[in-house]
Image (tube, grey):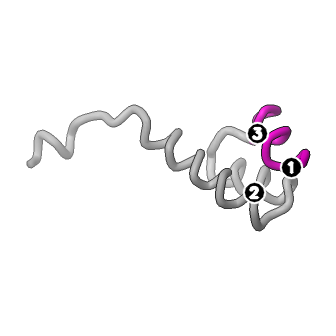
Amino acid sequence: MALEAQRQRSGVTNTMRSRIVRIGAKHITKDELNQMLLDADFVPLKDKEIAFYYNK
């Protein structure tokens, strides 16, 4: 179990960010969500995410 805990996980950060963007876009404005991502040390919203979630 200790070896498993030490194993590097590559996609966890991207998966968490994707979930935050997908769910947050339904409830939070673009600028507010972008600032929250920056405050949490995630990559800000990408152009394709803005186009998909906010330009409907």
Chain-order first, disc 3 or disc 2? 2
Q: Amino acid at mark 2?
A: Ala
* Outermost residue toward the right in this view: 55
Q: Is residue 55 magenta?
A: yes
Q: Secondary structure at mark 2?
A: helix
* Spatial CA span between label 2 and label 1: 7 Å
Q: Secondary structure at mark 1?
A: helix
Q: Is residue 9 magenta?
A: no
Q: Which mark is residue 54?
A: 1
Q: Is residue 6 left or right of residue 14?
A: left
Q: Is residue 12 left or right of residue 30?
A: left
Q: Which mark is residue 49?
A: 3
* Spatial CA span between label 3 and label 1: 8 Å
Q: Which residues make up the magenta segment?
A: 45-56
Is the residue under label 1 in contact with that under label 2 (CB below 8 Å)? yes
Chain-order first, disc 3 or disc 1? 3
Q: Is residue 14 left or right of residue 35?
A: left
Chain-order first, disc 2 or disc 1? 2
Q: Residue visible at 85% across and 60% down?
A: 29
Relative vertical location of residue 10 with respect to residue 28 in this rendering, above or below: above
Q: Is residue 55 left or right of residue 19?
A: right
Neighbours of disc 1 within 10 Å: few (<14), some (14-19), many (20+): few
- Residue bearing the label numbered 2: 25
Q: Which mark is residue 4?
A: none
Image spot of residue 53 (x, y percent): 79, 48
Is the residue under label 2 in contact with that under label 3 (CB below 8 Å)? yes
Q: Amino acid at mark 3?
A: Glu
Image spot of residue 25 (x, y percent): 75, 57
Image spot of residue 28 (x, y percent): 79, 64
